[in-house]
Amino acid sequence: MTTYQELLKDIALTDERIIVMTAENLASIRGIPDALGSRFIDTGIAEQSLVGMAAGLALRGRIPVIHALSTFLTMRAFEFIRTDVGIGNLPVKLCGGVPGFLSEANGPTHQALEDIALMRIIPSMNIFCPSDEQELTLGLRQVLEHSGPFYIRLNHAKTVIEHAPDFKIGKAEVVFDGDDITILVYGMLFAEAVKARALLQAEGKNVRLLNMRTVKPVDEEAIIAAARRTSLLVTLEDHFITGGLYSIVCETLIRRDVNCKVLPIALENRWFKPALLPQVLEYEGFTGEKIAEKILKIYHGGPQYVKSR
Amino acid sequence: MKKEQLYHLKQMALKVREHCIRMSRSGGAFTGSALSCVDLMVYLYGQFLSCGPGDPSRDYCFLSKGHAVPALYGTLAEMGVLPKERLSAHLSAGDDIYWHPNKNIPGVEFHSGSLGHLLPVAAGVALDCKLRGQDNRVAVILGDGELNEGSNWEACLLASAYKLDNLIIIIDRNRFQANKKTEELVRLEPLEAKFTSFGLAAETINGHDFEQMDELFFRIPFEHHCPNVVIAETVRGKGIPSIESRADRWFCNFSDYEAELLLKELYDTAAGPAAGVAL
């Protein structure tokens, strides 16, 4: 399978507009500097200037693909993203490393749990949250070709279910159809959602699984169809409960005047326990088993609002 | 510089100052900050740079201290890039002429207003010119108070690391920020030494003296592979003695009567020794 950096390199080598940049984070692009030469720019540990310079390059017709850890990119440089890239509606592609639970044992300084909330309030911004590396590469060309700015929650996870090649910005992937419960998910929790679904199916529940992919623009029709066909929507995300997928789904339902029970599984008003990923998922209750348990409790008439842990 | 050209620039600067005063009525403008960089703007657009909008080989001029926008729009109007009648739409919802630059206005390369933004952006533009082997010059005007923002110093390090000798950073050194003198709030001196220690080539001049500017700017790049810094010593409110160097003349909202008195003072001062009209 082609990796993110192999594909990015291939695209960049045939498209002079692409400039690959980083604020000294090479984790996702180790092979790029040698391949691209002067079209690879490292700004050192300076996210604000990374974004500002990218805006300048974009003014000259370039498509800067910039890399930094999600927290520092979306927060340290937030105003530069909002004011230079956002107001300018420039095609800067912001690639955030180790978003959400992927920061593992780094601690709260590195936990990007508000990145989607911050990016989605910028009017011209778009957001792509791939569930694994295959999906990241599946969407990459369209994201780079898009005329506006994009925030990409980088995720290099292995594929648990092969994605069909029909990627479209603004369109969710209906991974499984179902009539009882819908799980809406994006990013690295996709694999846990697949496990949770299998457990629920074994309990006799018919579960629809929606991989949201681009949470902005979001696939409103997929949300509305799920709310009409199933009696419980579950939003599953490694993000604070405020401003992410739960907010997006609730806003959509209210705006479209469609009523449905929604169970949020997200981080509530707290950072997560730093540890290696499997332990984080276990400790915080985001394994397939724990997710299935929470969903069953609610489905069988428990309170709609439950703590994530 | 030829006498005729010097006369032309001086006349143009007077007109631009008149625009600044007229734009400071009915709603107001950041008059003091605009007047201090009028001569710099007039020199850059009228003499040094070739900023023909849309021409890919053009020089770039960015105004990072966006609140000085009357100086920019006044200059663009006198250059014939922006129709003069649009200046009277200042602050009207019917146009895009407000307290900070908008990219929809002809001749404006990028919006600004939030301080500490356009040096990184200009560095990106300068870097692209270098990558493409083009020799466009990229000028960016910063306020001295604006240097409080750390992003400028990040960008200085980067401009130096990437050897952007096509980048010209101009500091409008009027020694005031919003409410206070720069040296009384957060000291900037020794300023030239700060830039040189960051790896840039810095020179200081009188930012109201066209002949000095001309002598200096045509020596750019000062050093091979070194970004250029011009510290232009200026006076807040320059051209109108009664409002010069006053902390309370940052933002002004003049009545029509006050504006007429100030314009008379402006032209009287330019014509020769004359007493200022106290306000």
Image: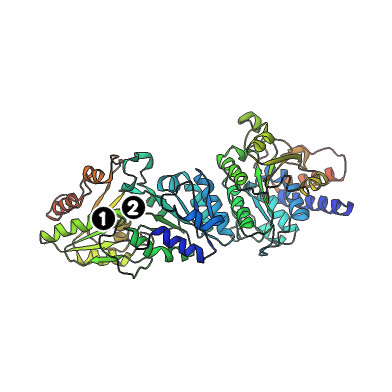
Indicate the position of residue A23 as horizontal and vertical percent values: 49, 47
Pick out the residue farthest to the left: A203
Left or right of A43? Residue B247 is: right
Q: Chain of mark 1?
A: A
Left or right of B131? Residue B13 is: right
Residue at 36 percent across and 49 percent down: it is A99
Residue at 46 percent across and 60 percent down: it is A9
Left or right of B269? Residue B149 is: left
Q: Are marks 2 and 1 in contact (CB under 8 Å)?
A: yes
The CA span between labels 2 and 1 is 9 Å
Indicate the position of residue A8 as horizontal and vertical percent values: 44, 61
Pick out the residue farthest to the top: B184
Residue at 38 percent across and 64 percent down: it is A139
Along the line of sight, the residue nearer the viewer: A151 or B43: A151
Circles 2 and 1 on the same chain: yes
Indicate the position of residue B263 as horizontal and vertical percent values: 78, 47
Along the line of sight, the residue nearer the viewer: B279 or A2: A2
Q: Amino acid at mark 1?
A: Thr
Indicate the position of residue A307 as horizontal and vertical percent values: 22, 45
Which comes before the other along the chain, label 2 or label 1? 1
Q: Secondary structure at mark 1?
A: strand
Q: According to the image, label 1 marks what residue?
A: A235
Q: Quadrant of residue A186?
A: bottom left
Q: Amino acid at mark 2?
A: Gly
Q: According to the image, label 2 marks what residue?
A: A244
Pick out the residue farthest to the bottom: A166
Is residue A204 among the parts visible in the rendering? yes
